[in-house]
């Protein structure tokens, strides 16, 4: 066990952190607590001592640390896959980034398979930080995100439409029976159409096919009405794999499991 000392000079700071239980500690929070405790240590010295004694754990994000409370009985990380995202949002709460695709499906509760690597979506006019430690996907969503466990998460409708637009970025098509049906059931036709409007024809064709495959015939019919009379052929999956031809949508599918 990695035991930790608690010098008298740090006791009031750690006590305050234990009361607040922040997942991420920023430099501004340290300043606030230091002022309240009437410490004479400067920011750098205070942070360095807390790190050295195991109460703060370094993160990639500048001026942010993970708090390791006494309940962990040592200087151990909680293993939160989103700790770097939380640190980023502490500094930039309006950053245009959100939990996306299969990670959104997991956070929304529609999958039994947790992604091995976190997936984040970001808007096209924003460059994601290298500190995030996640796979990032560029996508301009329209619907509001949902706040889950303190994080912005794509809605069901955004996730479905994004998966249709960026199918290669969605990593769990083989388990679509596990997540796609539930996610479609939780989405409303109006929300899906709002997210899908003005997307390209290939996205709409794949989306209509996904709706039909998921048994959402009313949504499929609405999407079909947005397509031209004879849409171009669209591929859904790698072109070098065996594929099923779906004539209604003029889609070659090599992604979804056979039902």
Image: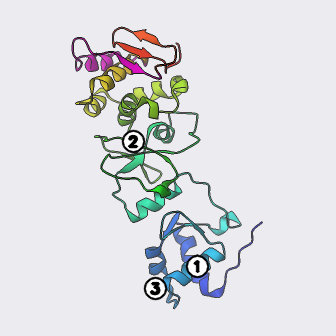
Give the crowd class for mark 2: few <14, some 14-19, many >=20 residues within 10 Å. Answer: many
Residue 35: mark in rendering? 3
Is disc 1 in contact with disc 3, using a CB cutoff of under 8 Å?
no
Q: Nearer the viewer, mark 2 or mark 1?
A: 1
Report helix, strand or loop for mark 1.
Answer: helix
Magenta part of the chain: 214-238
Residue nearest the viewer, comparing 137 with 163: 137
Query: Mark 2 to mark 1: distance in Å?
Result: 37 Å
Q: How far separated are the C-alphas under marks 2 and 3?
A: 38 Å
- In this rendering, position of residue 17 left or right of residue 219: right
State the residue position of label 2. 154
Q: Indicate the quadrant containing the N terminus: top left, top right, bottom left or bottom right.
A: bottom right
Image coords of residue 114 (percent x, y): 57, 39
Q: Which mark is residue 48?
A: 1
Query: Closer to the camera: disc 2 or disc 3?
Result: 2
Q: Quadrant of residue 230 in the image?
A: top left
Where 88 falls versus 168 (above or below)?
A: below
Q: In terms of sequence position, does the residue under pointer 1 or pointer 3 come before the other?
A: 3
Residue 196 point in image, percent of width and height: 28, 30
In this orientation, which residue lies closer to the viewer: 218 or 65? 65
Q: Report, in whole angstroms, how far the alpha carbon at label 1 lies from the one at label 3.
A: 17 Å
Its colouring scheme is rainbow
């Amino acid at each position: 066990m990695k035991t930790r000392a608690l010098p008298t000079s740090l006791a009031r700071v750690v006590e305050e952190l234990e009361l607040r239980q922040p997942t991420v500690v920023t430099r501004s929070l340290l300043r606030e607590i230091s002022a309240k405790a009437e410490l004479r240590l400067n920011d750098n010295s205070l942070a360095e001592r807390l790190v050295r004694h195991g109460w703060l754990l370094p993160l990639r994000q500048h001026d942010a640390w993970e708090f390791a409370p006494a309940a962990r009985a040592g200087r151990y990380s909680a293993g939160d896959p989103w700790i770097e995202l939380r640190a980023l949002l502490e500094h930039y709460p309006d950053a245009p980034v959100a939990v996306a695709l299969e990670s959104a499906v997991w956070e929304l509760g529609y999958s039994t398979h947790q992604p091995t690597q976190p997936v984040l979506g970001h808007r096209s006019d924003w460059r994601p930080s290298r500190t995030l430690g996640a796979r990032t996907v560029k996508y301009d969503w329209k619907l509001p995100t949902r706040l889950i466990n303190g994080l912005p998460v794509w809605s069901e409708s955004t996730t479905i439409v994004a998966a249709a637009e960026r199918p290669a970025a969605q990593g769990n098509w083989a388990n679509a029976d596990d997540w796609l049906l539930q996610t479609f059931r939780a989405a409303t036709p109006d929300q899906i159409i709002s997210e899908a409007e003005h997307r390209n024809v290939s996205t709409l064709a794949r989306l209509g096919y996904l709706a039909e495959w998921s048994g959402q015939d009313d949504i499929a019919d609405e999407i079909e009405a947005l397509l031209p009379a004879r849409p171009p052929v669209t591929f859904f999956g790698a072109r070098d794999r065996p594929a099923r031809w779906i004539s209604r949508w003029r889609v070659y599918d090599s992604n979804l499991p056979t039902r």
